[in-house]
Image: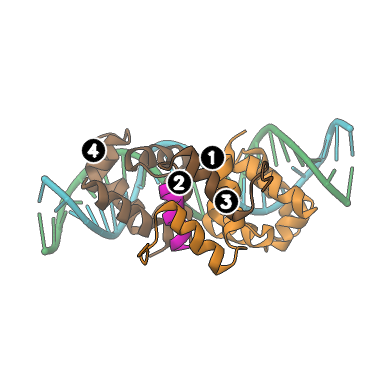
Chain colours: A brown, B orange, C cyan, D green
Amino acid sequence: MNVFTKRLKEARLKTGLSQKKLGIAAGLDQFVASPRMNQYEKGSHLPDINTTKKICEVLGVPVAYLYCEDDELAQLIEKYGKLSDETKQKIRNVAGLSLNDFS
Amino acid sequence: MNVFTKRLKEARLKTGLSQKKLGIAAGLDQFVASPRMNQYEKGSHLPDINTTKKICEVLGVPVAYLYCEDDELAQLIEKYGKLSDETKQKIRNVAGLSLNDFS
DNA sequence: TAACTAAGAATATCTTAGCAC
DNA sequence: GTGCTAAGATATTCTTAGTTA
């Protein structure tokens, strides 16, 4: 079980969708959605980048989230897009990434 | 030019390595390193996950970095691993991810 | 209904052999 | 040396046709 499959399964279960329904929601044909999503989640195959993007859109997570090895960083990646601009800026300040840090 | 190719090129140029040298450092055969790394950087092909991991190790970036669409989040992903545990915890607090937030 | 798998079909990447700068 | 590409060889995923719980 690699990181991709772990994050994919966790994110899917959060939505309450079955493997098949997630695949259909991501634009896969109804007859292939079940085996393909299962192959992705079990790790026997890896989806191409476009399918990955669509799956992530349905799951509400960035693509980077599925590839993130570090659990804490993965949490941060998942939440980052839902934060206010103010909070994002605060995080950038703390991380030392601010371009406009005159403090 | 997609996100993967953009981040790959930027990260490689930061290291000062040529495409070929990066490929060799990532474990690719010397005769295939140049075309393969070029194919990855130009976006004609995508490397498998194991090759991606090795490339990222040489580049000093997490795999998630190459797949991150958001530029600011990508910066944060790149820097996160280099931060102190204290700074990481501060960021988690600001993001509202702390499990031990009794404030 | 949901999760899962084998195996041939289809499609992708990888290697070779180069060219252009 | 560096960046880059076409095309056949190779390895992967995708579809089909199911089984299992």
Q: Residue A91, relative to residue A60: is it above or below?
A: below
Give the structural element (helix, strand or loop) at label 1.
Answer: loop
In terms of sequence position, does the residue under pointer 4 or pointer 2 come before the other?
A: 4
- At x 40%, y 42%, the residue is A82
For marks 1 and 2, give the CA distance: 10 Å
Residue B76: give its label.
3
- In the rendered structure, which amino acid carries the disc numbered 3? Leu
Give the structural element (helix, strand or loop) at label 4.
Answer: loop
Q: Nearer the viewer, residue A82 or B6?
A: A82
For marks 4 and 1, give the CA distance: 34 Å
Give the structural element (helix, strand or loop) at label 3.
Answer: helix
> Which range of residues does the magenta coloring cover?
A70-80
- Quadrant of residue B97 within the rendered picture: bottom left
Circles 1 and 2, Cβ within 8 Å, touching? The answer is: yes
For marks 3 and 2, give the CA distance: 10 Å
> Marks 4 and 1: same chain?
no
